[in-house]
Image (tube, rainbow, N blue to C red):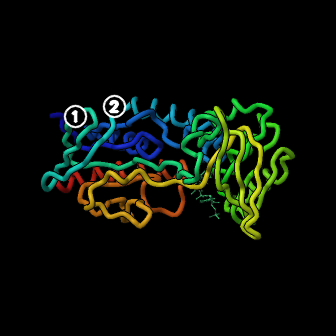
Amino acid sequence: MSFYDTVIIGGGPAGLSAGLYAARAGLKSLLLEKSFLGGQAITTDKVENYPGFPEPISGLKIIQNMEEQARKYDLAIDVQGVKSLVRNHETDFRIYLENGQELGSHTVILATGASPIRLGVPGEEEFTGRGVSYCATCDGPLFREREIVVIGGGNSALEEALFLAKFAQKVTIVHRRSALRADKILQERAFQNPKIHFLWGSTVQEIKGDTQVREIIVQNLADQSVASHRIDGLFIYVGSKPNTAWLPSTVAVDPQGFVITDEKLSTSLKGLFAAGDCRQKPLRQIVTAASDGALAGMMAYHYLQENT
Ligand code: NAP
């Protein structure tokens, strides 16, 4: 069985940053990513608030740079899903992979990020990939000159609506309240964009279509009236949930499932750290994920100095 000083689970900005810091500190480190590096960051077309990059840079480019930098310091990266994690004894974890393999590590850094929340209405599952999407960067160009609806009022909804407006004929943002949650700068841009329209105080009740999505049923929450809207595509941005359901019950999480950490990013399990969007925190950004990763990598190093 391979044994490591630290195993990092998740290859988004938090995991890659943790890997960079751990590897540079001389720890025998392995980063495990179940599908592709980057997590939610690579679904962002233009990142304007990552310090040090005054010109917009794509989330994908930031991740490619992070990977290149971490590999320079010999961070091992493996594409493997993790099934479970068990604390074996005082300073030892066992990590069970989906391929049946077992790894050992003195410390573990959780950087599993978060995934889009589903709206939970009839038709959503049926039409996902057939006009219903959670990734404008991936699917937006398919909707050139089409009519698109975006659901949500947060940063993701507005950023993606602005991106979609480059291709679409018309983008309608359906939001359940009459005030947006998104940053002011995004709100101003959306209000000024002639292709973007708003449907306030409304929720989507049902998604309909044939081989493709064609129609949504929208309820006005003020008077409960219901109307049908013809659409070509639907992009859903109603928040995200942490990828933590698989963790053992000994890891303390909040009611939404975000991992609870102290200021050194230690979790309730000794030797287990958490970084990025999977942990309870007030601001989820690429820069705060990278910052968490740096801290977690160094805290794993200090933990090993004191405990092995
Ligand atoms: P979010 O900030 O949680 O916003 C979710 C939006 O969806 C809210 O407007 C919410 O409405 C609405 N919503 C939730 N459940 C709904 C339902 N069942 N039906 C209809 N609408 C529903 O989520 P997010 O925009 O995905 O952002 C997640 C995190 O990533 C945030 O911390 C955000 O700041 C961060 N982020 C940052 C950037 C950036 O800074 N560039 C970009 C993307 C994401 P209410 O407002 O009424 O609650």
Circle 1 or circle 2, nearest the eye: 1
Q: Position of residue 156 (x, y in %)?
A: 63, 50
Q: Amino acid at mark 1?
A: Gly
Q: Badge 1: few (under 14), some or many (20 or more) residues near its Cα, within 10 Å?
A: few
Instruction: Give whichever of 42, 237 is nearer the camera.
Output: 237
**Left or right: 112, with 248 as reference point:** right
Q: Position of residue 139 (x, y in %)?
A: 64, 33
For the point 20% across and 56% down, which residue is it? 306
The answer for how far apart the CA atoms under marks 1 and 2 are is 14 Å
Name the image quarter holding residue 95: top left
Say whether disc 1 or disc 2 marks the residue closer to the N-terminus: 2
Q: Determine the secondary structure under disc 1.
A: loop
Q: Position of residue 299 (x, y in %)?
A: 32, 54
Instruction: Give whichever of 175, 107 is nearer the camera.
Output: 175
124 w.r.t. 249: above or below: above
Instruction: Give whichever of 231, 56 is nearer the camera.
Output: 231
From the image, tell me which residue sits under label 1: 100
For the point 54% across and 59% down, which residue is it? 283
From the image, tell me which residue sits under label 2: 78
Q: Position of residue 101 (x, y in %)?
A: 21, 34
Residue behind label 1 places its C-beta within 8 angstroms of ligand 1: no
